[in-house]
Amino acid sequence: MPLVEHFNLPTFRRLRDQGQEVLSLERALHQDIRELHIGFLNMMPDAALEATERQFIRLIGNCNRIAQFFVYPFSLPGLPRGDQALGYIEQHYARFEDLKEQGLDALIITGANVANPALDEEPFWEPLMEVVAWAEKHVSSVLCSCLATHALLKHGHGIERRPLPAKRWGVYSHRTCCPDHPLLREINTRFDTPHSRYNDISREQLEAAGLTVLVEGEESGVHTAVSPDGFRVVYFQGHPEYDANSLLKEYRREVMRFLAGELKQPPPLPENYMDADAVEIAESYLREASEAIGKGQEPAEFPVRRIEPLIDNTWGDTAKAMFNNWLGLVYQVTDVDRRLQFMPGVDPSDPLGLR
């Protein structure tokens, strides 16, 4: 069911322009449909702030459950921000203090860029842990992406992520490990998901802490895991929210860094992502741009528009289905939580009987 444009967020207008159903607040208030209130903690750096916001909110809006979705983006102190991003957050984002008073049904936490090898040394660590501590007691489920997954596993289970030999960067094939789990209902047993990370938490680490691995790839490692109850915390190491061109934009950024002299070697291409024609265009650009700089000339723009039509999105449908299942469970759990006093024998810590 639709998103509700309950405040002035440019993403709502953009999604509506792209054909997604977005209700005005006035119209939503006249609908006799249950509401779900979803917090969205956006910790992404400035360059990806709005794109990440749009990607996750689109996935929420694609859910087909009978509910109206009120999404509340917010961020944290301690994250490095420029003036433009700070102004955007001040104008369009909620305050965590207000959300605590209002209450939420579920929470999504994005990844973030880090500067320290130890996550608990990051300046945003304490504010993040404040949010997590509140969410543990007040929301039905928390869904974590990438860095947020590593932070919550460290906080909740003492699991330390491990550096990878090289950046895990590309689109990888995965298989479901627990196809009967309700988060994987009606999902293909094999599907693709993008990854972009330097660190990893393994199946062995997760299972030793009592967590359940739901989705894993031979090349990529664990993509999805859940807390011991099966639902209260959902962990993603991959990026199912990515647009088709998200990895291309990351690659362009790294190419520009190399051409500017910030990197000693040209970046590798994202694995399993570009076809042969796209690879040829990218490699030709890198050669020609390097030659131009060597002659003291300004290089041409990176050929994003030539490469984009050659890239296939092989993960979007599965991402929609998984978010649909997650929000469906949030819908069920919030309904059960409201009725627990009338349901003797139901375990409040496991209302869906997933364990």
Image: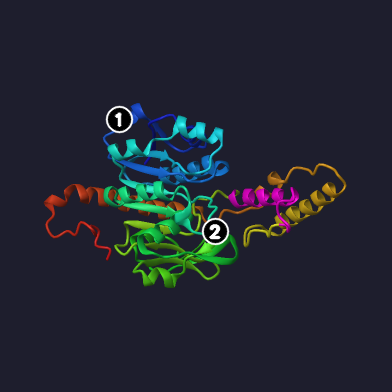
Circle 1: residue type: Leu
Q: Magenta: predominant secondary structure element?
A: helix
Q: Residue at x 37, y 46 (%)?
A: 64
Residue 318 visible in this rendered orientation of the protein: no
Question: Which quarter shows the C terminus?
Answer: bottom left
From which residue to which does the magenta span run?
Answer: 246-266
Rendered location of residue 19, percent (x, y):
49, 37
Residue 181 appears in which quarter of the rendering? Answer: bottom left
Query: Which element carries disc 2, helix, strand or loop?
Result: strand
Residue at horizontal 35 percent and vertical 50 percent from the top? 132
- In depth, the one of 314 and 346 nearer the eye is 346
Residue under numbered circle 2? 195
* Residue 140 x/y as whole percent: 29, 51
Residue holding disc 1: 29
Quarter-wise, where is residue 271 in the image? Answer: bottom right
Q: Position of residue 42 (x, y in %)?
A: 46, 44
Q: Return the residue nearer the eye: 42 or 19.
A: 42
Tell me, yes or no, whether the highlighted magenta stretch contains residue 256. Answer: yes
> Seen in the image, is 72 located left or right of residue 163?
left
Residue type indicated by callout 2: His
Whether the residues at callouts 1 and 2 have beta carbons within 8 Å, the answer is no
Location of the N terminus (image quadrant): top left
Label 1 neighbourhood size at 10 Å, few (<14), some (14-19), many (20+)?
some
Between the C-alphas of marks 1 and 2, the distance is: 39 Å
Identify the secondary structure beneath mark 1: loop
Q: Is residue 211 above or below residue 312?
A: below
Magenta stretch containing residue 23, yes or no?
no
**Farthest top residue in view:** 26
* Residue 260 image position (x, y, % from top left): 74, 48
Question: What colour scheme was applied to this rendering of the protein?
Answer: rainbow
